Amino acid sequence: MKKIILSVLITLAIIILGSVLYIYSGSYNISQLSHHNRLTRWAIENTTSHSIKRRIKDITVPDLSDSAQIITGFVHYNEMCIGCHGGPGIGQAEMAEGLYPSPPKLTKFSSKMDPKEAFWVIKNGIKMTSMPAFGPTHSDNKIWAIVAFLNQSLDKMSP
């Protein structure tokens, strides 16, 4: 039993040492122009998905059909989101073309998004994706207004 424990500890030490050496070697290309390999992309996508699902369980979705709320959401989307995500007949800003991962073009599927997930992402942002957290600068009501606009109107609008 002691040999097994010692073998496991030595294996872990080698893995940790190898990881530290890899990090300090500078071999990993962190450029926005160098995309992740499949394993890294899989790990990031699954970590993100499961993390969000765990955190949205207790969120209660308000009525998203209020036209005043949708208009407020449009104003905020137009001010903060359109540059990266684009809008009906409006492409993403030049800056967004250099982001990796690319911001999703919400005009194609916004009404299909889970409102709880959209609220959480807008409020909290997502690390290492250029998606900022708007929770520090916007009330929950304003964030829900953006979600209402996404859910009720964005992908139904013409240019």
Image: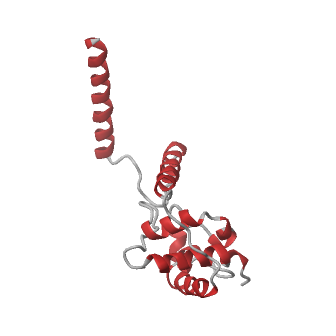
Q: Residue 98: horizontal and vertical position, in percent?
A: 51, 68
Q: In the image shown, does 5 or 89 lie closer to the viewer?
A: 5
Left or right relative to 21: residue 146: right
Instruction: Note whether 111 is above or below 68 in the view shown.
Output: above
**Picture residue at 62% right of the left edge, 64% below the top:** 113
**Picture residue at 31% right of the left edge, 22% below the top:** 8
Q: Which colour scheme is used?
A: secondary structure
Q: Is residue 102 visible?
A: no
Q: Can residue 32 be seen in this view?
A: yes
Q: In the image shown, does 66 or 83 lie closer to the viewer?
A: 66
Instruction: Note whether 25 is above or below 148 in the view shown.
Output: above
The answer to which quarter of the image holds residue 62 is bottom right
**Picture residue at 69% right of the left edge, 75% below the top:** 155
Q: In the image shown, does 47 or 144 lie closer to the viewer?
A: 144
Instruction: Note whether 28 is above or below 127 in the view shown.
Output: above
Left or right relative to 32: residue 91: right
Q: In which quarter of the image is the N terminus?
A: top left
Q: Residue 159: horizontal and vertical position, in percent?
A: 71, 84
Q: Residue 7: horizontal and vertical position, in percent?
A: 30, 18
